[in-house]
Image (spheres, rainbow, N blue to C red):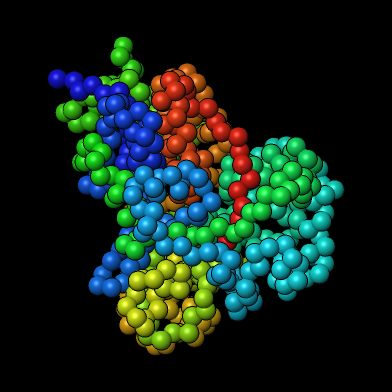
Amino acid sequence: MNQHYDVIIVGSGLSGLSVAQFLHARQPELKVVLLEKGGRAGGAVQSFQQGEYRAEWGPHGFLDNCPEGQELIRAAGLEDRVQKAPLGQFARYLCQQGRLVELPQNPKKFLLSPILSPFAKLRLLGDLWIRPELTEQAIGPWASHRFGQAILPLVDAAITGSFAGDYQRLSMDAVMPGVRNLEKEHGSVLRGLLRQRKAAAGKAVGLPAMQNFPNGMEELTTSLARNKDIRFQCQVDAIARDEDGWAVQAGAQRLQGRRLVIALPVNAALALLTSLAQPPVPEIPVARIANVVMGFARADIPKAFGCLAPEQEKRFCLGAMFSSAMFPDRAPAPMVLLEALVGGRRHPERLKLADDELIRLAYKDLKTLLPLPEPPNFVQVLRPSNGIPQMEMGHVNLLAWRDGLQERHPDLYISGFGWDGIGMNEMIKHGSRVARAIADNLRDEPAPAAVRPVYF
């Protein structure tokens, strides 16, 4: 016997949960079901706890500058449990020539800092006279062309901190479409930013804060999953159009829905969507990392979010999060907790190392940068099963294919990790947009690309 729903959501990660929550707020009478192949909701959002130590398998937080994100926190009933680490109160460090250098977070501090030479700072202004390239650009070549070679270690660090990716492969047009639009419209990124700032005169915008929760990021997805109709251990095998909308086959179960939301990471989504139309690529690359969690007694760690290492520094770790400096209760007092990230797109071979070797090499690497006692009092290696989707060259063609598919099937909505971004706020914003489109009986139209600030 077929089971009928108003909306079927495939996937109960942050994207699927966001769609379900925003849809419930708009039309609580709709019959909605989420289909989850695993035994838990939340997807890549997963927290670790052992005794009084807390760490993250996935994202370590999300910024408070997204209205949809704040709405979701309130809907989850967690507004009184949010922990905030304001960016303006915490330093961020770059590994430069074997030592940590503080990254300036505003233009004035940047111009006064020694992180770039005077000539390199002057070269940044070359952007004002360089014509935009109209074809898709990789981030590294694009940044070098517009701002000079000296900026590349900073760009590399920013990409490492978000994608664990290779900035020579990632698409500028896919990762930062708002900046590319600004460049093309005004002939220069700097000119476009100055005009934006002038248009926003009088609207003071400070630095945002990073957010987490006392029990880790998973507290958000656990709260969102409550009171939702989620079918766990429900692997979707196939989707197809039928006279009532969509038929979804999940093992022996057959479900029918008037509208279908595919809220899966790109590669998992492609495996289902190929039956409707052949995509330009069968899958996209992913970057996998290991999180080496280390607890120390009385380590003299600065009040900072952490540090990042560009590839040219030839470090073992991509960087490290100073977790106990950011949020309370990450380690028992007076312990200090660090989370070192290893692997990524450029060094997948390091993930083949045994846990003991990962710990040894990560500790050895960080000890040359930080005054760490010996040895760590607590260690744990977290190896997330979810890779980070890489929006590399050609990704814009995949997005055009997705948009065309949604245009041909107005009751199909494609959201999820790695389509338009990998940040939590990006997942939440797209989830809100999908819910609004369903509630208003519209198809999902691509939103205008905003300029995404880079905070390292």
The image quadrant that residue 309 belongs to is: bottom right
In-image side of 136 versus 91 (left or right): right
Q: Position of residue 168 (x, y in %)?
A: 61, 53
Residue drawn at point x = 67 percent, y = 45 percent = 179
Toward the viewer: 362 or 29?
29
Position of the C terminus by quadrant: bottom right
Q: Position of residue 5 (x, y in %)?
A: 26, 24
Toward the viewer: 202 or 375?
202
The image quadrant that residue 52 belongs to is: bottom left
- Would you place residue 109 above or below residue 201 in this image? below
Position of the N terminus by quadrant: top left
In-image side of 391 versus 412 (left or right): right
In-image side of 19 versus 208 (left or right): left
Residue drawn at point x = 81 percent, y = 69 percent = 118
Toward the viewer: 274 or 126?
126
Residue drawn at point x = 41 percent, y = 25 percent = 439
Residue drawn at point x = 76 percent, y = 47 percent = 198
User: Farthest top residue?
Assistant: 243
- Would you place residue 364 above or below residue 13 in this image? below
Q: Position of residue 175 (x, y in %)?
A: 58, 45
Q: Position of residue 379 (x, y in %)?
A: 32, 75
In-image side of 319 versus 2 (left or right): right
Residue 68 visible in image = yes
- Would you place residue 164 above or below residue 329 in this image? above
